[in-house]
Image (cartoon, grey):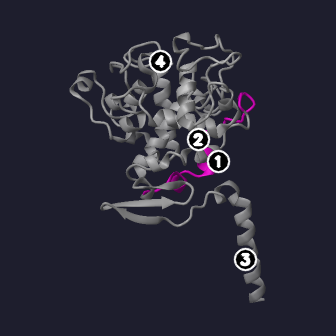
Amino acid sequence: MKMRMIMILFLLVIIGGFVHGDENESFRKQPTLVKTVKGTKMCVKDWECNKLSKFCCNLTITDYLDVDQFELLFTKRNSPVAHAVGFWDYGSFIRAAALYQPLGFGTTGGKKMQMKEIAAFFGHVGSKTSCGYGVATGGPLAYGLCYNKEMSPSQDYCDEYFKLTYPCTPGARYYGRGALPIYWNYNYGAIGEALKLNLLDHPEYIEQNATMAFQAAIWRWMNPMKKGQPSAHDAFVGNWKPTKNDTLSKRVPGFGTTMNILYGDGVCGQGDVDAMNNIVSHYLYYLDLMGVGREEAGPHEVLNCAEQKPFNPTAVAAS
């Protein structure tokens, strides 16, 4: 009888693993490999953080964000009103993030900072891909990742000024696509070069492959708009040290400056505008759902960019 009970429990554990595991199970990491390079501890964590890096010695994203939590953050993305049903998923995000975790994406600092950065990144993504509205079921903030492309493009977004470096391909349309929507031929060209994808000829790749779409968005987060300026990542995690001019322009490390970097005067330096507040609201919403809490977002001047002077005060920066 005792042996029979043990066998039953063993089978239940195995079956439970298959039933509950699925996507989470496929992301189980191998043991960390550790080396010391010039006095610095460096690590590799299987495929998720697979380049020797000090950041790979920290928690990786799957340590604190699993598929169930991802579903909670974007609970309405496959609802009947969504326009990208079945496109976005946890696996696509994790595979994309694996390219950047050795560089510090979601792996910088302690667990709280790591979770805050992912919430901040998702704050931008959720706001820019939402189809939520004021009285939407579950609240308007639950509808992130509702879109993967601009639904009714007003133009092809071909700028002939860049015809020598990023010439427009006949028939290609460079309208907004992705988790942080990409616009214009020069942006598709630059991001395509960075990711080793032919996005100039095939911008449609971004709306056909969620991993590519997340890769492009994380690349934007991790890289500055211009040389000498911070990336959104560096501004958020505290790697960036403001100059005297930055201080006079009210640009400080934190979430507010990530909006300045990504959208310029399309959002920042305009006072208390809805476009800015919507992004901030998504960030706070994700902080709460991830268990960090919005009280960790920082003071008002860190959280928004209402009074910041834009880094790049042009119409192009707002794209």
Q: Which residues are magenta?
A: 58-84
Cα–Cα gap, marks 3 and 1:
30 Å
- Is 277 inside the magenta-drawn segment? no
**Left or right for 297, reference 242:** right
Query: Residue 91 shows which numbered tag?
Result: 1
Which residue is more in the foreground, 10 or 158? 158
Query: Residue 9 shows which numbered tag?
Result: 3
Which of labels 2 and 4 is toward the front? 4
**Left or right for 125, reference 108:** right
Q: Amino acid at mark 4?
A: Ala
Which residue is more in the foreground, 118 or 172? 172
Instruction: Please name the residue that numbered disc 2 is placed on.
Output: 73
Compare marks 3 and 4 and give the one earlier in the sequence. 3
Picture quarter with the N terminus: bottom right
Q: Amino acid at mark 1?
A: Gly
Q: Amino acid at mark 3?
A: Leu
Above or below, comparing residue 247 to residue 22 in the picture: above
